[in-house]
Amino acid sequence: MLEELRITGLGVIEDTTLPLTGGMNVITGETGAGKTMVVTGLGLLFGGRADAGRVRAQPGRAVVEGRLRLLGRVAETVHARITDAGGEPDEDGSLLLSRTVTVEGRSRAHLGGRSMPVSMLGEVGEQVVAVHGQSDQLRLLRPAEQRAALDRFAGPEHEKLLDALREAYTRWRAVVDDLADRRRNARERNQEADLLRLGLDEITRVDPQPGEDDELKAEAQRLEHAEGLRTAAQVAQQCVAGGVEAADDTPDATALLGTARRTLEAQAGTDPALGELAARLEEAATLVTDVSAELSTYLAALDADPARLQTVYERRAALRGLTRKYADDVDGVIAWAERARTRLSDLDTSDELLDELDKEAARLAGEVADLAGRVSTSRQEAAVRFAEQVTVELAGLAMPHARIEVAVLPRPVGRSEPSLPVNGVEAGVGPDGADEVELRLLAHPGAPALPLQRGASGGELSRVMLAIEVVFAGSGGPPTLVFDEVDAGVGGQAAVEIGRRLARLARSHQVLVVTHLPQVAAFADRHLVVAKDTGGAVTTSGVRVVEDTERARELARMLAGLPDSDLGIAHAEELLAVAAKERRP
C-alpha cells in the first residue's frame, strides 16, 4: 500500500504530507481547496504526464514523494524490476519514489534510491495503483474499452487465447500484405532482381574468399622483394649457426653460447651462481637453435617466381573490380552477395511462389478464424458471469431493479478490416477478434436495454462504474484503488450504498476516495481534509487528519455547510455511528 504521500509546490499546495493507512482513506474539503491536486500528485508519482502550468512559481518546482510497502506477488514483481534497473528497497522493505517537475517543464524521477526514467514509475504504477475518475466513466462508454473490460474479467486463460489470436493475426496479415505487394509491384521487382543477378553472376565468377585481398597483398610484397628477403635471412642464419659460405674459423652464436656455458659449468662447484647462469645460457642456445631451423625453412620456401607474381597481380585486379562496385573490401563484397541472395528471394514473383503464399494465407486465415471463434465463445461465457455479478452489485447500490447486459456481437463487415467466417457468420476481424462488446443498462423492469451512453444518467453511470470496479477487485488487480469523485450526481440512499461498497472494497484493498458526499466520507478508516489558507498574499492549501469532534464538524460542513451547528454535528455523529456499525465484518 501507499503509506505516505508528500506534495510540494503543486497548484495551491505549498507543502503537505498525507499519512495514509490501509483500508479506506477519504479526502474532503471545500471546492477549490486542492483536492484534485492530491490526485494530480498521485498521477505524477506514478509516471503521469507533467503539466508545468500547475507548478508554483515559488519555489519553481513541484515535488511528489511517496513511500510504498508491498506484499506477496506484487512485491516480488516490483522489487525484482527495480533491482534489475539498479535501485533497491529500504532495509525495512519499503520503497521510496519521487517525481520532480520544474516550471520549465523538465521532469526527473527517482526510485529505490536511484535516478530512473519516468517510464519506470509508470511500470510500477500499473502494478500498484488504479485511478478512477469521471474521465474513466467516459472511457467506459467507448466500445473498445468495454471489450477490454470484459477481456480483463474473463481471466488468464482467455488472455492466453487472445495472445495466440493476436500472434496468428499478425502472421496472417504479413503474408497477405507480402502477396499483394509481389503482385502489385511485379515489374519493379523483376527489374531489381535482374540487376541483382548480374552482380551475383560477376561475383560468382571471381569467387572471392574472406580476407583474400589482405593475403594477396602480403604475398605480392614477398614476391616483389624476394632477393632482399633471401639475403637478410641467409646473413641472419650464418650469424646464429654458421653456414656453407662462412669462413671455417668464423664463430657463430650457437658455438659462442656453448663455449660460454661450458666455461661457467666448470666453475659451478666453486660458486653455484655461475651454475644458474650456465643453465640460462643453455636455454638461450636452445632458442637460437630453433630460430636457425625456422630461418632454414623460410629460405627453402622463399621463391622469386615471376609467373606467380603475375598471377597475384591479375587476381588483385579482379578483386579491385568487385570492390569498386559493391563494397570497400572483399569481406564487404561477400556480405553484399549474401544480402542480394536474400533480397532475390523477397523479390520472387514466380507462379510457384505465389501459389505457395496463397496456400499459406488461406491456412493462416483458417487459424485466425478458428481462434477468433474460440475468443468469441470465451467472451460470451464471461459476459454472462460479468453481467450477473455487476447486476448484484447494482442492487446493493440502490438500483435494485436495474440490470446489466453484456452483448457480444459479430463485428460488421465492410470496414477497413478484413472479414472471415467466424462461428458460421461473416464478420470483420482484427487483432482483438471478431466481436463488438456493448454494455447495456436496463434501468427498471420493462425498460429497453440501452447502451450505457444512452441509458445511464450521471449518477447511474457512477454506480455502474463502481459496481464494475467491485467485481474487478474480486479478480485481483492493483492493491491500491483511487476514486476521484466517482460519486458525482449521487445523493441520498445511493450515496450511503456507495460508501458501504467502498468500505467493502477496503477490506481487501487500500482505497483512496476524493468525495463531496458526507455519506461516503463517514465510512472512512482515515479522514483527511484539504484546507485552504487565504490569509497571506498567496493562497495555499494543506492537508490534516481529522478525528472525533473535528471529523463530526467536517461532516456537518459537508451536510449543511454549517460546521458549528449543533443539529448538523448531531446528524454527523449519527451518520458516523451507522457507518461504524456497517463497517464491522
Image: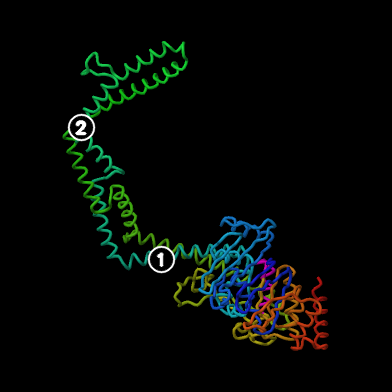
Read off the magenta span: 464-480
Q: Residue at x 23, y 52 (%)?
A: 324
1 vs 2, front mark: 2
User: Residue 31: image x %, image y %?
Assistant: 66, 85
Q: Is residue 268 above or below residue 453?
A: above
User: Residue 402: image x %, image y %?
Assistant: 69, 83
Look at the numbered disc 2 and give the secondary structure of its residue.
helix
Residue at the disc numbered 2 = 226
Q: Is residue 369 visible?
A: yes
Whether residue 465 is in magenta: the answer is: yes
Q: Count residues near mark 2 (Cα–Cα under 10 Å), then give few for <14, some for 14-19, many for 20+.
A: some
> In this view of the protein, which residue sits in the foreground, 408 or 461?
461
Look at the numbered disc 1 and give the secondary structure of its residue.
helix
User: Residue 97: image x %, image y %?
Assistant: 62, 64
Q: Residue at x 53, y 69 (%)?
A: 107
Residue type at tag 1: Val
Q: Is residue 460 visible?
A: no
The C terminus sits in image quarter:
bottom right
> In this view of the protein, which residue sits in the foreground, 513 or 37?
37
Residue at the disc numbered 1 = 176
The label shown at residue 413 is none
Whether residue 515 is in magenta: the answer is: no
Residue 515 as seen in the image, left or right of residue 265: right
Q: Is residue 520 above or below residue 5?
A: below
> Which color scheme does this rendered protein use?
rainbow
Residues under numbered marks 1 and 2 in contact, where contact means CB atoms less than 8 Å apart: no
User: Residue 403: image x %, image y %?
Assistant: 68, 81
> Which image quadrant for residue 116?
bottom right
Count of marks placed on residues? 2
Residue type at tag 2: Ala
